[in-house]
Amino acid sequence: MALQHLNGELLSCRRCPRLVRWREHVAREKRRAYQDWDYWGKPVPGFGDSQANVFVVGLAPGAHGSNRTGRQFTGDASGDFLYSALYRAGFASQPNSTSREDGLMLTNLYTAPVCRCAPPDNKPTLQEMTNCQPFLEREFALIQPKVIVALGRIAFDGILRVFSNKDHSMLFTHQAIYQLLSGAWLVSSYHPSRQNTQTGRLTVEMFDQVWRTVRGLLLRHA
């Protein structure tokens, strides 16, 4: 119920005028391939298991992905890469994610971004991410994950801001592992964006290793 209340607040949020204009513009204009879709065009809530031990943090909804479908990492290439990996790792009920009605369920995993509205060029400003930070803070407080996975440098930095981390030795690199003062483990990964996956910067095997690492950290808490 607490998460539902939080998401209700989120859906009415209009704190960032630039993002409100952009998300609604995209929802009206649409991409030609999705002309028949009724775009979501609002802030996108977190998604997954409210009792999760693993919390995955991304950047922001894609203009024609989550901003269209209304669910995290749903309807674009990043989501295809992520959910297929989560399926192989046993966190997702199916390897694909196309709409909120496709039956996908997450087990022991919850996901949310640092910025809840689709930003132009996938680049939210620091102020826009700061405006969104209270939602992420409250989700962390409600879920209390044992392992947090940062998908990309921006997500990594956003997590450190939430936990007021001042340890400058915590640097973003792929497959880095740190322990936060809260006791939760922080694992960093390259973002599964098309730019990273199509260039080979992030391969299937590299990404699968991230989730094997997550499983290993969960065993420490078992």
Image (tube, rainbow, N blue to C red):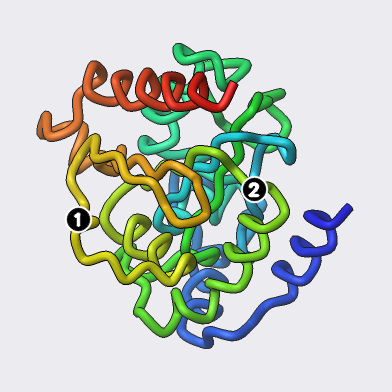
Q: Secondary structure at mark 2?
A: loop
Instruction: Say whether residue 55 is left or right of residue 156.
Output: right
Look at 19% across and 59% down and name the residue there.
169
Number of numbered discs on residues: 2
Give the percent coordinates (x, y) of residue 6: 77, 64
User: Quadrant of the rendered structure where residue 211 is?
Assistant: top left
Give the percent coordinates (x, y) of residue 57: 46, 49
Callout 2, which amino acid?
Gln
Residue that carries the numbered disc 1 in the rendered image:
171
Which one is nearer the viewer's eye here, 198 or 87? 87
Give the percent coordinates (x, y) of residue 48: 66, 37
Q: Is residue 207 above or below residue 75?
A: above
Q: Residues within 10 Å of mark 2 (few under 14, many from 20)?
A: some
Q: Are marks 2 and 1 in contact (CB under 8 Å)?
A: no
Q: Is residue 216 above or below residue 70?
A: above
Quadrant including the C terminus = top right
Instruction: Say whether residue 124 is left or right of residue 190.
Output: right
Callout 1, which amino acid?
Leu
Residue that carries the numbered disc 2 in the rendered image:
144
Look at 66% across and 35% down and name the residue there.
52
Q: Residue furthest right?
A: 1
Q: Residues within 10 Å of mark 1 (few under 14, many from 20)?
A: some
Look at 50% across and 16% down and name the residue there.
87
Q: Secondary structure at mark 1?
A: loop
